Every structure is written in structure tokens, then in C-alpha cells.
């Protein structure tokens, strides 16, 4: 395993959780506002993950 900061794993978990929850809300629910919120949170988490990945030294 490479030396990535602990926040990287947390962000990866958030991306996965928000991705699955957005998919479930899209397929099995009619709550459009909650679907938009989870999609936006997932996008923010993904952008933060990309930022942490590319600013970490030695990768």
C-alpha cells in the first residue's frame, strides 16, 4: 500500500456511499430533492478526493 493520508480513505468511502445512495434514490424512490443533494455531495467528495490525490507528495 502506498502512503496516502487517512482522509483519502474517508473521501473514498464517502464517494462510494453517496454514489450508491444516489443510484438507489434514482431507481427506487421519487424523492428528487434528496437525490439532488446526495448527487451534489458525491460530486464534492469526488472533487476533494481528486485534489487530495494529486496534491499528495510522492505519488
Image (cartoon, rainbow, N blue to C red):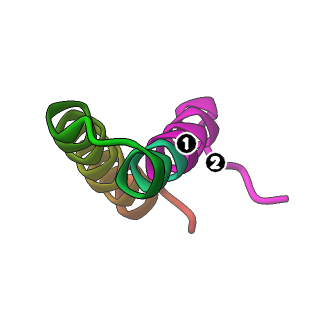
Residue density around tag 2, few if under 14, some if 14–19, many if 20 or more, within 10 Å: some
Instruction: Tell me the residue at 54%/50% (across/down).
Output: 20
Task: Classify mark 1: residues with Cα within 10 Å, few (<14), some (14-19) or many (20+).
Answer: some
Residue 35 % position (x, y): 26, 41
- The quarter of the picture where the N terminus appears is bottom right
Q: Does the magenta portion include 50?
A: no
In this view, the residue in front, 22 or 14, is 22
Give the side of residue 48 with respect to residue 10, left or right: left
* Res. 37 image quadrant: top left
Q: Is residue 52 above or below residue 50?
A: above
Tell me whether circle 2 and circle 1 mark residues in contact (CB < 8 Å): yes
35, 47: nearer the viewer: 35
Q: Could you say where residue 55 lies in the image, as x and y percent from the top left?
A: 35, 55
Question: What span is in magenta?
Answer: 1-19
Which residue is pictured at 39% across the width and 48% down the height?
A: 22
Q: Position of residue 57 (x, y in %)?
A: 48, 57
Which element is circle 1 on?
A: helix
Indicate which disc residue 4 carries: 2
Quick one: quadrant of the C terminus? bottom right
In the rendered image, residue 2 lying in the magenta stretch gets the answer yes
Instruction: Determine which residue is flagged by label 1.
Output: 8
Q: Could you tell me which secondary element the residue under label 2 belongs to?
A: loop
Amino acid at each position: 500500500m502506498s502512503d496516502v493520508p487517512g482522509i483519502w480513505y474517508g473521501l473514498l468511502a464517502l464517494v462510494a456511499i453517496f454514489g450508491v445512495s444516489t443510484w438507489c434514490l434514482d431507481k427506487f424512490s421519487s424523492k428528487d430533492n434528496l437525490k439532488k443533494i446526495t448527487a451534489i455531495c458525491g460530486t464534492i467528495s469526488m472533487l476533494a478526493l481528486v485534489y487530495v490525490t494529486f496534491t499528495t507528495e510522492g505519488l
